[in-house]
Image (tube, helix red, strand yellow):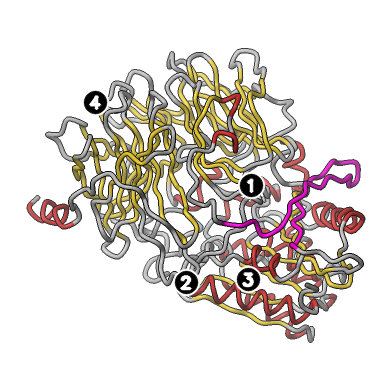
């Protein structure tokens, strides 16, 4: 105990007095936004993303009034990255986490007024602190002794020793708000808890959970109940598809969640389901929505949800009895908050979120639901950032399906000239491009730099994407690279009818599933003259045995690679490698769990054997998400140089 107390003392410093956050020379980044129950304050983690940064920017927890004014800045730990602020039910206290990655420690902080107290020290990682409805208990999800950061997109732990013998397990841990007791782990030691919600009696939790390896088993997770006193679990439901956002109704009788075909934990899209808390088959209460629900919360007897409907982010009120969904607000923007896409007050009348689109950088907005969006903006820290170009929502028909995408146009177009264009393919495949401000900063800023150099950028949302309903999302099952590539090519045709794009100077770029699609495209089409494939998949058979998340593949392929190898071979770019002619730059993280480096090596080797111009860059220590500033800058420079070389440079 003395050692723990000493360690916590080293990580706690005085809290600065309220002050203006100050001028910035970069891009203000807002993360983890939450709204106080009364709707009068927001808490958010803020940092400044600079072009010349050599490391991730230091963060601070900022409490702002509903008008955006800074009330308090909390920064008790110099080496920490803060996350997940959350208000107590009465709004008087704020819990948040501080993560010291180098030390391998996470601190749970509790702030009241000007006092910040370190309440618990976790030797490992933690996330999602939440107060019980009665305000007496604080829960978190914790991995004690974690071998890596949470999630399959993070770099894998070194693969030495007996593999798979000691997987990290994320467990519910609780501590009394009033103090007097240590943090206590309560959920089973062999179970990975992905998400949780308190029951209204403050005596338990509804959770999504699976036994074994947390990176892999979310795709087979159950909806379960965990008892606060005993830690005992019981199954509520076994969904047919993936599930996100388990939310217990105010009367405790049912659990709502978003269910659907989802290829990654994190990106959410599907219908709203309702399951009895006592156990039983879930019911899809919104089967007809031509969109994808993305987050969910109960307020009184109704559900307040967000959804992507076509090209618009929407806030809806959903009747849990009839399933009737009423759109309260919508706009072509991207919303973000700490626990879903929006944060709500206790009544559900006021909403807060970070709002952005292609020409407006992210800022905090707070207001009544019906008058939300850019009009409700209360911060202006990014007012000096100029847009990189114009944006147009493009719609087209492909094989009887309505498809949508985004066309970004460079500034200063000259009459009579044509321009190169890079087609970007999103990851997933269950995901979607939504309006996001192309900033620069240490994260690379490739999109912005392409626009500044005179390239058009096209971001299609082909079949398999969110935004058009669950049937559209499911339309590429056992057809990766088939119908979705035809949708993309039809989208390029549609763009060329409305914009001065030179068809002889087309490039294609993708990461993850987008990396696979890039590999597939260059082995099935000669329309593109330069390609960048990030963390792609060249050979589904070998991939099945190499990756750390093979459970995701069953819903999309229908069986394992051992039970139905033919479909895996059919959809592998390596099977048609000799048809490739497109110069292709390939990159991947050395410790990628989701799309391991050998996949990129296979494709690079195949292109070399086929006599195609190619380069391969394996980034040391990186996972599926490339995070180190020096690597992001290196990638951006090489990608831009690659497109300039093979597409003839910009036309501006």
Q: Quadrant of residue 468?
A: top right
Q: Quadrant of the C terminus?
A: bottom right
User: Residue 599 bears which disc, if any?
Assistant: 3
Q: Residue at x 58, y 59 (%)?
A: 439
The residue pinned by badge 2 equals: 52
Asked whether residue 59 is in view, the answer is yes
Q: Label 2, label 3: how many angstroms apart (C-alpha)?
A: 32 Å
The residue pinned by badge 1 equals: 357
User: Residue 192 bears which disc, if any?
Assistant: none
Say if mark 1 contacts mark 3, CB within 8 Å. no
- Frontmost residue, 253 versus 106: 106
Q: Residue at x 65, y 13 (%)?
A: 322
Q: Which residues are magenta?
A: 385-411
Q: Label 4, label 3: how many angstroms apart (C-alpha)?
A: 50 Å
N-term-proximal mark, 4 vs 3 = 4
Q: Is residue 539 left or right of residue 335?
A: right
- Frontmost residue, 379 versus 395: 379
Q: Label 1, label 3: how many angstroms apart (C-alpha)?
A: 34 Å
Q: Quadrant of residue 252?
A: top left
| Residue 409 on the magenta segment | yes
N-term-proximal mark, 1 vs 4 = 4
Q: Quadrant of residue 639?
A: bottom right
Q: Label 2, label 1: how many angstroms apart (C-alpha)?
A: 24 Å
Determine whether the residue tagged by mark 2 lies in a helix, strand or loop: loop
Residue density around tag 4, few if under 14, some if 14–19, many if 20 or more, within 10 Å: some
Mark in the foreground, 2 or 3: 2
N-term-proximal mark, 2 vs 1 = 2
Q: Residue at x 15, y 57 (%)?
A: 10
N-term-proximal mark, 2 vs 3 = 2
User: Residue 136 bears which disc, if any?
Assistant: 4
């Amino acid at each position: 105990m003395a050692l723990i107390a000493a360690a916590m003392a080293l990580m706690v410093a005085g809290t600065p007095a309220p002050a203006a956050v100050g001028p910035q020379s970069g891009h203000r980044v807002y993360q983890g936004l939450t709204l106080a129950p009364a709707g009068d304050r927001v808490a958010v983690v803020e940092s400044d993303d600079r072009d010349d940064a050599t490391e991730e920017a230091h963060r601070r927890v900022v409490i702002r009034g509903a008008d955006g004014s800074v009330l308090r800045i909390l920064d008790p730990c110099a080496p920490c990255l803060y996350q997940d602020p959350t208000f107590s039910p009465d709004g008087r206290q704020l819990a948040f986490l501080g993560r010291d990655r180098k030390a391998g420690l996470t601190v749970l902080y509790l702030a009241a007024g000007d006092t910040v107290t370190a309440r618990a020290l976790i030797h490992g990682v933690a996330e999602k602190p939440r107060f019980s409805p009665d305000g007496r208990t604080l829960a978190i999800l914790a991995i004690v002794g974690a071998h890596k950061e949470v999630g399959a997109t993070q770099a894998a732990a070194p693969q030495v020793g007996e593999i798979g013998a000691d997987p990290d397990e994320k467990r519910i841990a609780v501590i009394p708000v009033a103090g007097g007791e240590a943090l206590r782990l309560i959920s089973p030691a062999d179970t990975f808890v992905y998400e949780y919600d308190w029951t209204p009696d403050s005596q338990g939790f509804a959770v999504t959970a699976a036994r074994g390896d947390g990176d892999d088993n979310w795709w087979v997770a159950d909806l379960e109940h965990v008892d606060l006193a005993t830690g005992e679990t019981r199954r509520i439901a076994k969904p047919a598809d993936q599930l996100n956002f388990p939310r217990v109704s105010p009367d405790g009788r049912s659990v709502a969640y978003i269910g659907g075909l989802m290829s990654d934990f994190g990106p959410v899209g599907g219908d709203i389901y309702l399951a009895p808390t006592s156990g039983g088959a879930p019911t899809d209460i919104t089967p007809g929505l031509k969109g994808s629900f993305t987050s969910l919360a109960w307020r009184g007897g109704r559900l307040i949800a967000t959804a992507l409907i076509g090209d618009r982010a929407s806030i809806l009120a959903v009747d849990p009895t009839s399933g009737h969904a009423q759109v309260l607000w919508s706009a072509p923007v991207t919303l973000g908050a700490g626990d879903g896409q929006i944060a709500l007050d206790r009544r559900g009348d006021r909403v807060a979120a970070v709002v952005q689109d292609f020409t407006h950088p992210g800022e905090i907005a707070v207001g009544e639901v019906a008058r939300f969006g850019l009009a409700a903006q209360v911060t202006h820290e990014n007012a000096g950032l100029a847009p990189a170009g114009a944006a147009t929502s493009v719609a087209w028909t492909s094989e009887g399906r309505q498809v949508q995408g985004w066309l970004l146009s460079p500034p200063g177009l000259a009459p009579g000239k044509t321009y190169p264009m890079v087609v970007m393919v999103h990851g997933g495949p269950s995901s979607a491009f939504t309006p996001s401000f192309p900033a620069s900063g240490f994260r690379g800023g490739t999109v912005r730099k392409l626009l500044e150099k005179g390239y058009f950028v096209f971001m299609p949302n082909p079949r398999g994407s969110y935004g058009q309903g669950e049937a559209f999302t499911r339309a590429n099952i056992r057809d990766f690279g088939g119908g979705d590539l035809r949708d993309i090519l039809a989208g390029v045709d549609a763009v060329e009818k409305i914009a001065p794009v030179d068809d002889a100077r087309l490039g294609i770029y993708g990461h993850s599933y987008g990396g696979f699609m890039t590999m597939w495209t260059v082995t099935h089409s000669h329309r593109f003259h330069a390609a960048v494939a990030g963390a792609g998949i060249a050979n589904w058979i070998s991939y099945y045995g190499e990756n750390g998340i093979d459970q995701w593949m069953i819903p999309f392929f229908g069986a394992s690679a051992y039970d139905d190898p033919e479909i895996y071979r059919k959809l592998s770019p390596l099977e048609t490698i000799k048809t490739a002619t497109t110069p292709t730059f390939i990159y991947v993280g050395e410790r990628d769990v989701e799309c391991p480096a050998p996949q990129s090596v296979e494709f690079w080797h195949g292109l070399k054997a086929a006599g195609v111009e190619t380069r391969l860059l394996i980034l040391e220590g990186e996972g599926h998400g490339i995070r180190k500033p020096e690597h992001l800058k290196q990638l951006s420079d090489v990608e831009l140089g690659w497109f300039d070389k093979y597409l003839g440079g910009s036309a501006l």
